[in-house]
């Protein structure tokens, strides 16, 4: 079977699964799976750029996705004038002061190599930072804490937040890459995982910036609200003309709007990723991945190239994070868990085919479909499997109580089967 025919066949299979969901379980669920599948495919594309093309083992995906979500808040939410008046300028000045302290300390160590002098500079900078920051943050968080308690954003259109999310994640990736990309793959994984947890901890605790664990509700949307559509006489009349209930029609209209927007973004990123993969730059990155020693011997700056691809992949994850937060209409820092935003994305890349952009996209759709459907169908499947056991059986009770773990079991079984029978993924790298 040729690679092209296999690609068409597998994508057709995924399309049949989603269409079948729409027929058997309703179009609403099918569109939910499609939209998050599109977002997951973009995340997998970013990770595939880092791992599949460059061999960088990044386990900090969650942090970059969260930064993309934060970009939606900072870009699209309206500003809170009272909070800005209470201490907005001073709070941001403290952030600038902290950045200057760290940069200045790094520069001083590079020039003087005197640890005590750097330590003294960091200590003085930290004291000044807290002296500037603490009163400002307390004043901001005291402004109507139940409803706001933060500075808000810039009030710009929410679609602008998607590239901003990519830029924010790229900036963080540059900082992380400058310090961590010299490590070996296993140590790089530990470093990126730890740094992503630090990013989440900052977002959870800096209420003046993101409302912390109190969440940000009512984020702007690039498509109309369902209520507005239901109150529009023209829309109601059109829906009735096609035999749809206005409530159902408005829900489907909004979800289809998201699907079209997300599809455009995915296609653009996929085309760019394919151009990059087949370009001289892509061939150089694969050569570095396969043999760093030979690449260095031929004069390639391996660390710089690793930094390039690390930034690009993280930026794509940041764009996906902003899109997902826009889809949810909610920024909840506590929702960012490594299981969903690191482990599952890696499963998508491995199952789809590491090093193949189309494979990563396929893995994003397929694994997300199974992730959703196992939760929906898991209780019924377990009931059927245990139907032959006697009522009151301890084994049956144990299996039924384990239904909540069906998702993890399913992902593990799929990963093992793919690694056993198709170690390079469903769509291997050519």
Image (spheres, rainbow, N blue to C red):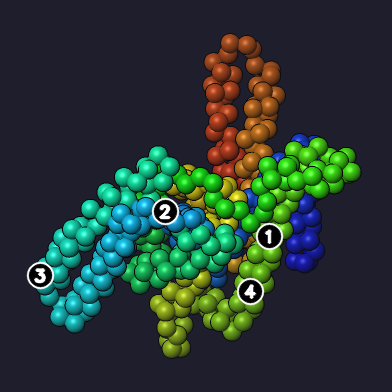
- Mark 1 and mark 2: span between their CA atoms? 29 Å
Is 50 on the left-hand or right-hand side of 37?
left
- Mark 4 and mark 2: span between their CA atoms? 38 Å
Dot 3: what SS? helix
Outermost residue toward the bottom in this view? 299
Viewer-side residue, 152 vs 179:
152
Dot 1: what SS? helix
Within-10-Å neighbours for mark 1: few <14, some 14–19, many 20+: some
Do residues under tags 4 and 3 come within 8 Å of each other at their CB atoms? no
Is residue 243 positioned above or below 266 on the image? above
Q: Name the residue under label 3.
A: 116
Is 253 on the left-hand or right-hand side of 113?
right
Is 108 on the left-hand or right-hand side of 357?
left
For residue 261, which numbered disc appears in the image?
1
Residue 1 position in % (x across, y down): 79, 63
Residue drawn 84% across the image and 40% down it: 244
Residue 10 position in % (x across, y down): 75, 56
Which of disc 2 and disc 4 is earlier in sequence? 2
Which of disc 1 and disc 3 is earlier in sequence? 3
Is residue 61 positioned above or below 378 on the image? below
- Mark 3 and mark 2: span between their CA atoms? 42 Å
Within-10-Å neighbours for mark 4: few <14, some 14–19, many 20+: few
Question: Which label sits in the foreground, 4 or 1?
Answer: 1
Question: Which label sits in the foreground, 3 or 2?
Answer: 2
Residue 377 position in % (x across, y down): 68, 32
Do residues under tags 1 and 2 come within 8 Å of each other at their CB atoms? no
Q: Name the residue under label 2.
A: 80
- Mark 4 and mark 1: span between their CA atoms? 17 Å
For residue 272, which numbered disc appears in the image?
4
Which of disc 3 and disc 4 is earlier in sequence? 3
Dot 2: what SS? loop
């Amino acid at each position: 079977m040729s690679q092209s025919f296999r690609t068409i066949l597998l994508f057709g299979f995924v399309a049949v699964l989603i269409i079948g969901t729409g027929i058997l379980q309703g179009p609403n669920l099918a569109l939910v799976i499609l939209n998050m599948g599109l977002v997951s495919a973009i995340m997998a594309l970013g990770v595939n750029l880092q791992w599949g093309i460059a061999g960088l083992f990044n386990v900090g995906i969650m942090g970059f996705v969260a930064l993309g979500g934060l970009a939606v808040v900072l870009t699209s939410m309206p500003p809170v004038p009272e909070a800005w008046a209470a201490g907005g300028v001073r709070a941001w000045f403290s952030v600038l002061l902290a950045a200057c302290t760290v940069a200045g300390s790094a520069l001083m160590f590079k020039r003087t190599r005197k640890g005590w002098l750097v330590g003294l500079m960091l200590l003085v900078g930290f004291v000044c930072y807290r002296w500037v920051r603490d009163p400002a943050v307390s004043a901001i968080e005291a402004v109507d804490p139940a409803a706001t308690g933060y500075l808000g954003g810039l009030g710009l259109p929410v679609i602008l937040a998607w590239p901003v999310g990519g830029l924010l994640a790229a900036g963080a990736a540059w900082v992380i890459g400058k310090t961590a990309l010299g490590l070996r793959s296993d140590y790089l994984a530990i470093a990126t995982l730890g740094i992503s947890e630090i990013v989440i901890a900052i977002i959870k605790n800096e209420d003046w910036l993101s409302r912390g664990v109190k969440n940000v509700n009512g984020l702007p949307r690039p498509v109309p609200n369902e209520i507005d559509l239901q109150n529009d006489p023209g829309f109601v009349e059109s829906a009735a003309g096609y035999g749809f209930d206005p409530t159902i029609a408005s829900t489907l209209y909004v979800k289809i709007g998201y699907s079209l927007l997300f599809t455009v973004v995915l296609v653009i990123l996929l085309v760019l990723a394919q151009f990059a993969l087949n370009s001289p730059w892509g061939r150089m990155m694969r050569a570095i991945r396969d043999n760093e020693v030979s690449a260095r011997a031929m004069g390639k700056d391996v660390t710089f190239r690793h930094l390039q691809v690390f930034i690009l992949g993280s930026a794509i994850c940041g764009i996906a994070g902003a899109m997902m937060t826009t889809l949810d209409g909610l920024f909840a820092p506590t929702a960012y868990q490594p299981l969903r935003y690191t482990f599952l994305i890696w499963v998508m890349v491995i199952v789809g085919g590491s090093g193949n952009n189309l494979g990563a996209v396929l893995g994003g759709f397929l694994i997300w479909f199974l992730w959703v459907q196992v939760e929906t169908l898991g209780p019924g499947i377990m009931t059927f499997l245990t139907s032959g056991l006697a009522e009151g059986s301890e084994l049956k009770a144990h299996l039924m109580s384990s239904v909540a773990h069906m998702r993890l079991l399913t992902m593990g079984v799929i990963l093992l089967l793919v690694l056993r029978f198709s170690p390079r993924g469903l769509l291997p790298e050519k």
